Image: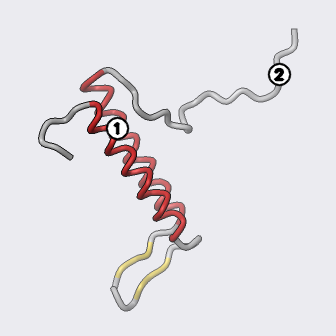
Amino acid sequence: MPNKVTLESLKNALDEVIAKGITDYLNAPARRGYSRLAGQSIPSKNDVARATNQNCRHLNDMAVSLFGTSIFEDPDTVEVKIGTPKD
C-alpha cells in the first residue's frame, strides 16, 4: 500500500484481501488443526472466513471515515426479507 491513502488504494487492498481469503479458504481444513512440525495452530475454514470478513470491514470503515464512500457491502448487515408481502 502506498504512503498516501486514496480510495483507489483501499479498493485495491480490498481486492487483495478477498483474493487471498478465497485462496486460503479453499486450502484450509474444515476443522482447526495443529502442526507439530511447525508448532502452531492451523486455521479452519471458519477462522479464515471470519478473518477475511473482519479485514474487509476494517478497510470499508477506513474508506467511509476518510472519504465518505463505502467500498464493501457486508452481507451480515444486509436486511433479509423472507416471503412476499400480502396486501
Residue at the spot x=41%, y=85% of the render?
Answer: 35
On the image, the x and y values in percent for residue 28 come to: 51, 70
User: Where 13 sits versus 73, above or below?
Assistant: below
Amino acid type of the residue tagged 1 in the rendering: Lys
Residue at the spot x=40%, y=77% of the render?
Answer: 41
Total numbered circles: 2
On the image, the x and y values in percent for residue 67 come to: 27, 23
Residue 84 tag number: 2
Residue at the spot x=40%, y=40% of the render?
Answer: 57
Q: Quadrant of the C terminus?
A: top right
Name the side, left or right, on which 19 lies relative to 84: left
On the image, the x and y values in percent for residue 50 come to: 47, 54
Q: Of residues 58 and 10, which is closer to you in this image? A: 10
Q: Quadrant of residue 83?
A: top right
Residue at the spot x=14%, y=36% of the render?
Answer: 4
- Marks 1 and 2, how far apart in space? 35 Å
User: Where 27 sits versus 76, above or below?
Assistant: below
Q: Identify the secondary structure beneath mark 2.
A: loop
Q: Of residues 6 and 40, which is closer to you in this image? A: 6
Q: Mark 1–mark 2 contact, CB under 8 Å?
A: no
Amino acid type of the residue tagged 2 in the rendering: Thr
Name the side, left or right, on which 59 lies relative to 18: left
Instruction: Assess disc 2: are there few (<14), some (14-19) or many (≥20) residues with their C-alpha within 10 Å of its C-alpha.
Output: few
Mark 1 sits on what residue? 11
Earlier residue among tags 1 and 2: 1
Q: Identify the secondary structure beneath mark 1.
A: helix
Name the side, left or right, on which 27 lies relative to 71: right
Q: Of residues 6 and 36, which is closer to you in this image? A: 6
